[in-house]
Amino acid sequence: MTFCLDTYLQESENYDILITRAGFKDCKKVIEDHAQEIIHINAGEKILGVRVIGIPPIPIGIDDKRGTVTLPYTKPCYGTSVVELPVDKEEIDKIKALRYQK
């Protein structure tokens, strides 16, 4: 399945925005406080069809039981938000494969 976050957010209401118009530090804290599992990725990695920007390493929250990911999403002119959305297992596995290696 090919997934595009921009399209999904425009066409679906099946997601939660946990914080909006925030700095990277605040977004990181929200993800770390909210998610069941945290992985970290490098800035510029492509997740769900978009490049994730921020101060590396960037936290991505994963909840395998609920089938959701929580990630920072930066949109020009709107700032950075933290979005939690459902994705299939294949997408979760792709995200886990991007895990930041020191």
Image: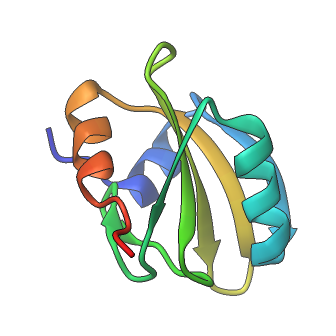
Q: Residue at point 38% right, 67% down?
A: 100
- Residue 67 vs 11, above or below: the answer is above
Q: Nearer the viewer, residue 18 or 11?
A: 18
- Residue 78 vs 37, above or below: the answer is below
The color scheme shown is rainbow
Q: Nearer the viewer, residue 38 or 81?
A: 38
Point out the residue furthest to the front here: 102
Point out the residue furthest to the top here: 65
User: Can you tell which quarter of the image residue 89 is in?
Assistant: top left
Q: Residue at point 30% right, 27% down?
A: 88
Please count the marks in the image. 0
Across and down, in percent, residue 98 comes to 28, 60
Q: Residue at point 31% right, 69% down?
A: 46
Q: Which quadrant of the figure contains the N terminus?
A: top left
- Residue 98 vs 92, above or below: the answer is below
User: Can you tell which quarter of the image residue 80 is in?
Assistant: bottom right
Horizontal side, residue 7 vs residue 23: left or right: left
Across and down, in percent, residue 51 comes to 39, 75
- Residue 52 vs 6, above or below: the answer is below
Across and down, in percent, residue 55 comes to 62, 84
Q: Which quadrant of the figure contains the C terminus?
A: bottom left
Horizontal side, residue 26 vs residue 95: left or right: right
Horizontal side, residue 53 vs residue 25: left or right: left
Q: Residue at point 63% right, 85% down?
A: 76
Horizontal side, residue 56 vs residue 51: left or right: right
Q: Nearer the viewer, residue 47 or 63?
A: 63
Q: Nearer the viewer, residue 37 or 31?
A: 37
